[in-house]
Image (spheres, rainbow, N blue to C red):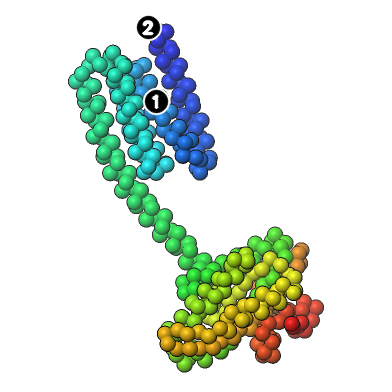
């Protein structure tokens, strides 16, 4: 009999160590596979079940550990795993009752455990489901808050704060990139003529049209008002000329909204930040804005900023 207990305790210890190793692994790698998570649940329940067999009457204390495991795994892995842990636990405990002479000799105590085995987890089901619903709502609210903190609520494009963070990161990493400053021509006239609601619809439509260029891996943003920006990971002049031309053509298409037609154009200032060039974020916007201004007053469509001669610009 002593050898039996030694064997059972040894096996329970191995299960316990195995469970701890898995738990640590998943804690450090929360995106572990479903089967690895399931292995933790099964091994934990098995350890509790074997402990009850080995400890006899004292094993009743393991039941609370079982409930804690059910709740813990449910909160850690989600509602689906809560069901799996419960079913696995019930099967494990039923096996314990069936094969253990001690528990089978105590029908009253066994019946009480079996009854609580099904009733108490129901309470935890309700509790965990509520916790999950509240947690999911908090997560969704947090995601919305984070999204609107970095995105424009009208066009859903990244906002100025997001753009500045992007530029700062690229400058710190010594990346080569082109910054396109886009300003809508004639927007103020359309906005004054048809009203702010119509102006908002135009800005939304502009955002949709610019999103076409996201497929090429460009970073888009709305600076505010009728100003937009695009970051391109290239300073190839011919490529940038082609992109700027395509953007202008896309934005010059008629805006037929709420039975009102408006025709706009765009002026684009292009600043290229070369690799290892030392520059501030504010200078990036300032240089591109300066190039855009020259393009607008000279009706060039787009213009490049010339670093050597501040206002000496190259145009296509």
> Mark 2 or 1, which is nearer the eye?
1
Q: Position of residue 109 (x, y in %)?
A: 22, 21
Q: Position of residue 30 (x, y in %)?
A: 50, 42
Counting residues from the N terminus, which is met first, the one under dot 2 or under dot 1? 2
Packing grade of label 2 (10 A; few <14, some 14-19, many >=20) is: few
Residue in the picture at 49% in, 70% down:
156
Among all residues in the image, which is located at the extreme right? Answer: 308
Residue in the picture at 77% in, 77% down:
307
Q: Secondary structure at mark 2?
A: loop
Q: Nearer the viewer, residue 302 or 125?
A: 302
Quadrant location of the C terminus in the rendered image: bottom right
Q: Nearer the viewer, residue 141 or 281?
A: 141
Residue in the picture at 56% in, 87% down:
264
Q: Is residue 138 above or below residue 222?
A: above
Q: Position of residue 308 (x, y in %)?
A: 80, 78
Among all residues in the image, which is located at the extreme left? Answer: 108
- CB contact under 8 Å: marks 2 and 1: no
Q: Secondary structure at mark 1?
A: helix
Q: Nearer the viewer, residue 216 or 277?
A: 216
Packing grade of label 1 (10 A; few <14, some 14-19, many >=20) is: many
Q: Which residue is mark 2?
A: 1
Which quadrant of the structure image shows residue 285? bottom right
Q: Is residue 71 visible?
A: no
Q: Position of residue 227 (x, y in %)?
A: 57, 79
Quadrant location of the N terminus in the rendered image: top left
Q: CA distance from mark 2 to mark 1?
A: 21 Å
Q: Which residue is mark 1?
A: 46
Residue in the picture at 45% in, 16% down:
10
Going by the image, does 86 lie left or right of 302? left
């Amino acid at each position: 009999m002593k050898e039996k207990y030694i064997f059972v305790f040894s096996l329970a210890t191995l299960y316990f160590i195995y469970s701890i190793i898995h738990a640590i692994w998943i804690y450090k790698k929360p995106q572990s596979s479903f089967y690895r998570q399931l292995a933790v649940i099964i091994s934990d329940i098995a350890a509790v079940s074997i402990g009850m067999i080995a400890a006899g009457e004292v094993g009743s204390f393991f039941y609370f550990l079982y409930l804690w495991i059910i709740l813990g795994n449910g909160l850690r892995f989600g509602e689906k795993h809560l069901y799996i842990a419960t079913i696995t636990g019930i099967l494990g405990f039923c096996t314990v009752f069936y094969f253990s002479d001690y528990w089978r000799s105590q029908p009253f105590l066994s019946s009480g455990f079996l009854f609580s085995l099904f009733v108490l987890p129901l309470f935890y089901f309700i509790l965990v489901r509520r916790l999950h619903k509240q947690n999911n709502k908090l997560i969704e609210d947090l995601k919305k808050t984070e999204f609107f903190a970095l995105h424009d609520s009208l066009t859903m494009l990244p906002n100025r704060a997001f753009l500045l963070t992007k530029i700062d990161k690229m400058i710190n990493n010594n990346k080569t990139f082109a910054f396109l400053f886009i300003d809508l021509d004639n927007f103020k006239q359309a906005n004054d003529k048809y009203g702010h609601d119509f102006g908002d619809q135009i800005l939304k439509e502009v955002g949709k049209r610019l999103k076409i260029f996201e497929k090429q891996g460009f970073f888009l943003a709305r600076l505010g008002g009728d100003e937009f920006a695009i970051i391109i990971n290239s300073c190839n002049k011919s490529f940038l000329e082609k992109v700027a031309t395509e953007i202008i053509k896309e934005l010059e298409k008629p805006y037929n909204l709420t039975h009102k037609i408006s025709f706009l154009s765009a002026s684009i200032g292009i600043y290229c930040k070369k690799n290892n060039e030392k520059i501030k974020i504010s200078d990036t916007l300032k240089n591109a804005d300066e190039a855009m201004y020259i393009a607008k007053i000279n009706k060039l469509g787009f213009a490049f900023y010339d670093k050597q001669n501040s206002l000496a610009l190259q145009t296509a």
